[in-house]
Amino acid sequence: MRRLFQSAGCAAATAVFCLFAARAQAISSAVNISTRMMVETGDNVLIGGFIVFGTGQKNIAVRAIGPSLPVKGALSNPVLELHDGTGAIIAMNDDWRSSQQNALIAAGMAPANDLDSALITVLSPGAYTVIVRGVNNAVGLALVEVYDLDPGTPTARLGNISTRGHVLVDDNIMIGGFILRGDLNKRTILRVRGPSLSLNGVPLAGRMMDPTIELHDGNGALMAQNDNWRSSQEQEIEASALAPTDDHEPAIVATLTPGNYTAVVRGANNSTGIALVEMYDLDQPPQSDGSTLYVAQLRPQGAATSQGSGTATLRLAADGKSAIISFSFSNLSGPISGMHIHGADGGIIFDVDSATPQADGTIIWVLTPVGSLSVADILNQIKAGQTYFNIHTAQYPNGEIKGFFNVSTGAQTAPVPTPAPPLPSVPPTVTDAGRFLSQSTFGATDALIAKVQSQGYEGFLSDQFAAPMSSHLAFVDAAVAALPSPAPSATPNQPTLTQTNDAWWTYAVSAPDQLRQRVAFALSETLVVSINSAGLANKPFALPAYYDVLVKDAFGNYRQLLEDITLNTAMGAYLNMLQNDKANPSRGTLPNENYAREIMQLFSIGLYDLNLDGSLTLSPGGFPIATYGQDAILGTAAVFTGWTYGQPGVANPVFFPGAAAQDWRSPMINIASHHQTTAKTILNGVTLPTGQTAAQDLKTTLDTIFNHPNVGPLVSRQLIQRLVTSNPSPGYVYRVASVFNNNGQGVRGDLKAVVHAILMDYDARVGFATAQGAGHEREPVLRVTNLLRGFNATSPNGQFSVRNAYASLSEEAMHSPTVFNFFSPEYEAPGAIAQAGLKSPEFEITAETTVVSIANYLRTAIYSFLGPGTARITLDLAAEQTRAADPAALVDHLNTLLMAGRMSPNMRTTLINAVNQIPSSNPLERARTAIYLVINSPEFTIDK
């Protein structure tokens, strides 16, 4: 596989030099990369990136050479930082003798000058970034070098190498060197981007408009050069599927023998500017056997209301000529009528059910042209996440379940990431506080920013952990009690879904226990219960009672949470555990499998074995390893039998009580005569003996599930995704999952400790927020709560009766269309995001229509009001109107309040100019315009 890798800071797209290296053994591979260029300040420090591919670990040395360079203007004292794939610093060095002196000397990596920097480290597979800057913001020429210290290791290899910097003239052009070692030739493409560079869709200021590239051999002889890519090798470049998007950008295709090479980037006619230079290995395999693993999560397709689910895997051969397909599924509505792999346009590109299975059940797919699609087209669609696997049934002839193939990582041996550096012991800045609040609350306020600065992170967290719980059920009860009294003969007042929604919005916007409520919302997107099934929309006490379980247990133990949701009546109704009866052979009925399936698949362990860092555990054949089979589902389904409504005060409760006795507030109870007491085989092959009570079966089953090693990484990763970033680094997941496994006092599943670990991890507090894949799209409801909280929204009765939210936002608490939430944690938007291997869960509900409807909804909140006319929710813009006299002051305050100081200079200038177009005599319009533009901007929407 080959795909664009952008190192940390490549979003700003200065100069990056990318190389995908090759397999070990006889295939040539990169063992050293070095680039010399001017190190400046700000965005123009030197930034290099590389990827370690494979299943093992890679021993490397990284050096930043300045004072020992025999050139004029060398950087006098370089500082070296090594970041992981999310930008978190995992190692750093100033003067090389200050640490690892003996190891550097022993490896032959000791620089000639004590002020040069160097480090040695062992890295797990993943993306890494090297940053070189000058002490005290000094500038000068520097050389960054990355050495593979064990190039013969077959299980890991240096895969992608990059360097970023500002391309100037004379000695300050960009000069990148690399070495190929091995026996075979390597086909590569080099290209430079300049005119096409953009940031958040806006052409990048200062980009180089006419870059050129030269390729030199180890003797300095010119091998090839290019100015505009169409001027030569046009057909070869187009065939690579990596042609530049602008005709003024250069590219070279070359087949290289093992040896030393240099790429030189300069501007035509001595022009300067920002450029991106890339090198792709056109036959790069990312796994030790040369194959690339893609996984599809199969979910209900389109409008299908199926309970079916499953997975499919595609292992693409290194030569791109064939793939091995495997799949598993369950709970379909009926007989299968077809299984296919579809392309980007929805057409079938491989008919799975017509292929002959291998002895192990896998299918061999030999790629061939289909219609107008060439094999190269099909490969490009696979790599861009545009192909999907689906299963058709008699009830759903157009497809019952489907899933897009996305590249996945894994290892046969569990990786151990490098420990993160300690957090700096400095008070939070305004920007730090704002970013922290975006992760720990439903939106920052000026008062909370000041509070975090005053208390520090730990003080704020201590207060939040101690804050009393705001009960949703108590809110609904109070709202019902406040309704006008009915006539004596009328039915007593009953709540509606309105009170349930009002409780959620009111607490999200104004509850003092913000962290608890935010974590409960995150949990509700994994442990899903929704109005859209089991008639729960008409059982308004059921939903707040369930949500209170999440609120209560948000800082408790996950084992207790699993038990509480299992016995909750709303969950029982939603996933068919309520009144799930034992098997009846005479009727041919079996226990319902729905809850048994979802508690394992979605709520705890997932479908495949995981390493502690969240990556897949792979079999010797390179495939994911299933966590459980149908026997475990059947056995667990039998455990969850005999449970029915709690019936407080009833001396002899029954399995099928009348409507009046159906209590949605109390946990379910078990009726022994309806519980299956036969022996049962559950997860991990554990056997429950004959004759156990329902309580005994339940305890052993929940204990077995809870103690599975997958629970820590699965729960930790999904909470990180909801609170901090869609693409947590393996190290981030590893550290938080380790806390889940042991809070430091021998306790497993301590969610308070897990939440603390998530928010106080190095990646959350200091991580390089501009790295590729950092942050996440703000969920639509969070965009609304940020707006309402940021501008002290009020309503006449103090409640927030937000209306029509789901219709406009495609999201609202407890309104998920299925048990799989509004979006999957594994979703990768097809195209560039999927090709980069990045998760983008919230993008699954982002489309042209939702972008417009959300913008319109937010405009209504800013320019008018939300809610019914009798309970209008309005913003307090008095302070912003005062600031509007100075557009720069207004914009800067919005930057602090809403964006934690991350607004780009271009965006700031654009907003100030926009506000200046409005007469100063209309401060309200100035304030509204500025807020509307910020709240709908890409830079706000992507929360980093």
Image (tube, rainbow, N blue to C red):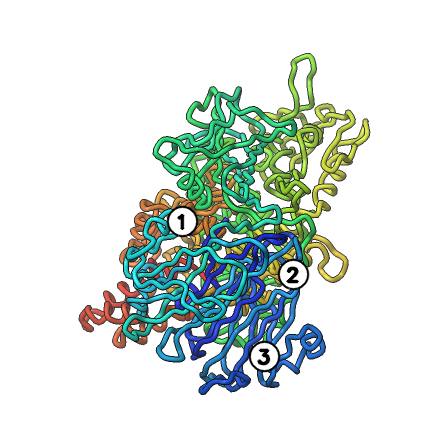
Residue at the location (36% across, 79% down)?
A: 170
- 851 on left or right of 704: left
Residue 44: horizontal and vertical position, in percent? 42, 75
In the structure shown, which secondary structural element does the residue marked by tag 2 occupy? loop
The Cα atoms of the two marked residues, 3 and 1, are separated by 38 Å
- Most distant residue in the top direction: 586
For label 1, the crowd category at 10 Å Cα-Cα, with few meaning under 14, some 14 to 19 and many 20 or more, is some
- Nearest to the eye among marks 2 and 1: give it: 1
Q: Mark 3, mark 2: which one is toward the viewer?
A: 3
**Which amino acid, mark 3?**
Ser
Residue linked to disc 2: 417
Mark 3 vs mark 2, CA separation in Å = 22 Å
> Mark 3 or mark 1: which comes first in sequence?
3
Point out residue 64 in the picture as x, y percentages from the top left corner.
55, 77
Q: Which residue matches tag 3?
A: 117
Residue 240: give its label: 1
Q: Are marks 3 and 1 in contact (CB under 8 Å)?
A: no
| For residue 530, side relative to residue 916 (left or right) | right
Marks 2 and 1 in Cβ contact (< 8 Å): no
- Along the horizontal axis of the image, is 932 left or right of 730? left
Image check: 665 left or right of 891? right
For the residues marked 2 and 1, what is the alpha-carbon distance in whole angstroms?
Answer: 35 Å
554 or 312, nearer to the observer: 312
> In this figure, what is the number of numbered marks?
3
| Dot in front, 3 or 1 | 1
**Residue 520, image x and y in percent?**
55, 52
816 or 143: which is nearer to us?
A: 143
Residue 752 higher or lower than 47, as above or below: above
Task: Locate residue 387, reporting x and y percent.
Answer: 44, 38
